[in-house]
Each structure stands twice: as C-alpha cells, then as structure tokens.
Image (cartoon, rainbow, N blue to C red):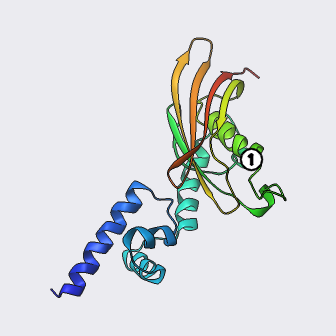
C-alpha cells in the first residue's frame, strides 16, 4: 500500500472517530481539526458514505421526534438528535440572523431559554409537564450562525411527578448556558 493511501486511510479513520465523538461538527470544523482543506473533508465523507451535517441532524431528529410525549414536535426549539425518555436528551439549534438584536448581533436570550425549556420538557416521560422553577445562567454571548448543542439529563425524580432536570448548552464544546429546572407532571 502506498504512503498516500495509508495517510488517507488514517485521516478517514480520524474523521470517523471525531464524528463519533461530536456528530455536530461542520466540514469547516472537521477540516481545521484534521489540518486539511474543506474539499478534502467533503471527498472523504462522500467516500465513507457520511452525510453532510444538516442531513445527519435531520436523520437523527426524525428518529427521536416520535418518542416525545410531553410536548408536540413542532413546539420544540431545535432538533432532538438523541432521546432517552425519562433519562437524557440532546438537541441542536442553528442560530440565524432573525434571532439577534439588531445593534449587537447577539442572539436574544428567549431563543436560548426556549431551546433549554423545550428539551427539558421533552425528556420527561409524561403526557404533560411544565416548568415549576428555573435557575438559569447565560455564560457567553451567542451570535447568528453559531450552532448550539443542548445536553439534558434528569438528575432526580421526586414523588408527585416532580423532576430535577439539568440542561447545558454548548457552542463549539464551550458551555454558553446552564439551566436547572424543576419540572412537574400535570394531569389534564
């Protein structure tokens, strides 16, 4: 085997490893991590049968939206890419220009909070759940074009259908928002 094909094979194996660790990376981010050009990453992805980011997110989201009980899929801010009902979830949100304040170009807080609240509700294995108390912290500003990844886990289930749920939102693996929610099951 030639030296070029060995290097290519190693790079493609690294690409697979990187995407297994973080499937939400763009081709540009992958190129930077692999120290190659964006077209090289695209060719490697095509050769390996790995879809582009939007398609990866759509495929993961379509598998999970049907599992949600406590909120309708179209009410969720972001795309649920992993859902373990009653335990944990991950969602992704691509921020856009229409989400920002015109002067600062910073994404409005209610989009970030809505992402956190909706995924926290979605992870609850109940017909209806609402936020009773929220303790939130915005840690860094977000700008249009940033890709947010929310990771949610139920930390404790209390009697009476009460849940302690933690939501951490990341941009490029840096925490930008943290929320601790008390969610309550509601009979309808």
Residue 130 rendering spot, x and y as whole percentages:
72, 27
Camera-side residue: 43 or 84? Answer: 43
- Farthest left residue in view: 1
Residue 117 rendering spot, x and y as whole percentages:
68, 36
Mark 1 secondary-structure assignment: helix
Question: Is residue 72 visible to us here?
Answer: no
Rate crowding at label 1 as few (under 14), some (14 to 19) or many (20 or more) other CA atoms within 10 Å.
some
76 vs 149, left or right, is right
Q: Looking at the image, is 53 positioned above or below residue 116?
A: below
Splitting the image into 4 quarters, where does residue 48 fall?
Answer: bottom left
The residue carrying mark 1 is: 111
Label count reads 1
Q: Looking at the image, is 120 positioned above or below residue 115?
A: above
Q: Looking at the image, is 17 positioned above or below residue 132?
A: below
Splitting the image into 4 quarters, where does residue 180 fall?
Answer: top right
Residue drawn at (48%, 79%), measured in percent from left and top?
38
Residue drawn at (58%, 54%), measured in percent from left and top?
61
């Amino acid at each position: 085997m030639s030296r070029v094909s060995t290097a290519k094979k190693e790079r493609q194996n690294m690409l697979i490893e990187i995407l297994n660790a973080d499937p939400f990376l763009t081709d540009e981010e992958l190129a930077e991590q692999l120290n190659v050009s964006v077209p090289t990453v695209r060719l490697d992805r095509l050769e390996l049968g790995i879809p582009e980011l939007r398609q990866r997110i759509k495929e993961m989201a379509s598998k999970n939206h049907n599992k949600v009980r406590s909120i309708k899929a179209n009410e969720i801010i972001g795309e649920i890419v992993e859902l373990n009902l009653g335990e944990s979830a991950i969602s992704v949100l691509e921020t856009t220009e229409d989400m920002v304040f015109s002067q600062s170009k910073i994404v409005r807080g209610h989009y970030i909070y809505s992402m956190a609240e909706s995924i926290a509700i979605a992870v609850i294995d109940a017909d209806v759940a609402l936020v009773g108390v929220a303790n939130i912290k915005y840690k860094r500003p977000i700008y249009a074009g940033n890709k947010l990844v929310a990771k949610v886990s139920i930390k404790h289930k209390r009697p009476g259908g009460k849940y302690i749920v933690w939501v951490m939102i990341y941009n490029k693996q840096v925490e930008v928002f943290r929320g601790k929610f008390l969610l309550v099951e509601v009979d309808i």
